[in-house]
Amino acid sequence: MKNWKKTSLLTALVLGLLIVGIFYLFNLKVVSSSGDIEFSPGLEPKGTTIDSVDNTPRNIIIFVADGLGFTHLSLAMLTQQKENKTSVWQQFDVKSWHDTRSTFGPLTDSGASATAMATGTSTFFEVIGQDAEGNHLTNVFELANAQQYNTAIVTDSYIWDATPAAFVAHTGSRDNAREILTQIAASELDLLFGELEDLGEDEIPDLETTIEILKQRFQLLDATLTLPQQTEVLAPIAAIFEEDEIQDMTSTPNLLQLTDAALRYLSYRDSPFILLVECEEMDSASHRNDSKRVLKGIAALQETLSLVLDYAKTQGETLVVFTSDHETGGLAAVSDSNYPNLQLVWATKNHTASVVPLFAMGPGAETFLDVKRNSDIGQRLKILISTSKGLSE
Ligand SMILES: [Zn+2]
């Protein structure tokens, strides 16, 4: 009996020490019995880097579906099955995921996550193109411009929103609209299609000032998106639309039409290009827990992605990287007694700490196989651009 007591005490002590050791090692602390867990920013996964690539593309299209998580993706796949369409998702060579964490911890926002993807360095919430200490970070567009690439942005959100801004600008806050717009006009960006928002409020210039700033670099197109003649020397172009004007496939223009016009323009120009397409609908709809709007957004997303993949396959030297910056809403598709019908339920109106999909197709796609964190995407894009065919042409 005495020995048994000793043994169990010893076992309990060893187990206790082991648990304390594990918690100490991973800096993980259960804060309360309600399930709150505190994670440190440095927790796994660590980022992975590569030094070189075997296969380089001529063009790169980065497609970011803001706020899209694995349930949004599952709904997209289910929609295509229901409509008997060929899945756009099955066309990708690489189907993976990445951890979207910021330097703050497992949560992030579009500023921090897009900065990580555009520069290869993790940063803090709300920051655009700078690290957590405020240092300037070179982004993939700047690297591409230095090698005679054309650079372009198409978004269904406003043109100075965090995701597009992180590929062009450098500022401590995503709310610095005037500063971001001024930096866009001073950049080497060749095409910019997107909306305006909250004109004249706080840091946001009014319409007249916005146009004045944009005209310093871009030829402004009207809503018909009539491109300059192919034979003309093409100036950098921009097209701006009202708040929420670009939403789903019923919008004029919609994301599909804007992306189509951008690809035609970039083809005329006949230089290697890097194009960012942002579908922001998932994030806006999920912040509102608006399931119907999510489904409409999914339709616009899939139609546009299908166009992008068709372009890449026909062109033959274009890499497409599809991903998301974070999940929004904690969306789940569940069923009660009425199986197999699904109900969409939401856990939050904010971002979640979920990992998100990462897909790639075309030359260099395999580069994204062992990506762990959002910053790894930027690191690989930089390697691809600095070793790509853009240099030799
Ligand atoms: Zn959001």
Image (cartoon, grey):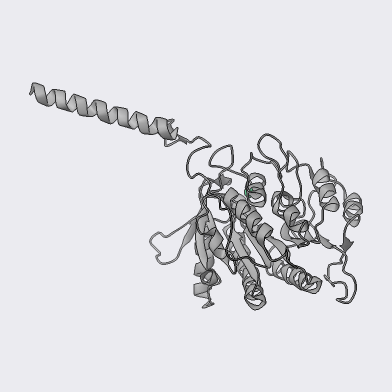
Where residue 121 sits, quadrant-wise, is top right
Where residue 242 sits, quadrant-wise, is bottom right
Quadrant assignment for the N terminus: top left
Could you tell me how many numbered marks the image carries? 0
Residue most extreme to the top: 2
Residue in the foreground of this view, choosing between 157 and 289? 157
Which residue sits at x=71%, y=62%? Answer: 274
Q: Position of residue 188 (x, y in %)?
A: 82, 56
Which residue sits at x=41%, y=33%? Answer: 25
Residue in the foreground of this view, choosing between 105 and 79? 105
Which residue sits at x=83%, y=67%? Answer: 223
Residue most extreme to the left: 1
Image position of 243 with respect to 299: above or below: above
Q: Position of residue 101 (x, y in %)?
A: 56, 44
Image position of 24 with respect to 89: above or below: above
Residue in the foreground of this view, choosing between 149 and 240? 149
Q: Position of residue 20 (x, y in %)?
A: 35, 29
Where residue 170 sits, quadrant-wise, is top right
Image position of 121 with respect to 140: above or below: above
Camera sees residue 306:
yes
Q: Position of residue 247 (x, y in %)?
A: 70, 62
- The answer to whether residue 127 is left or right of residue 186 is left
Camera sees residue 253:
no
- The answer to whether residue 355 is left or right of residue 339 is right
Quadrant assignment for the C terminus: bottom right
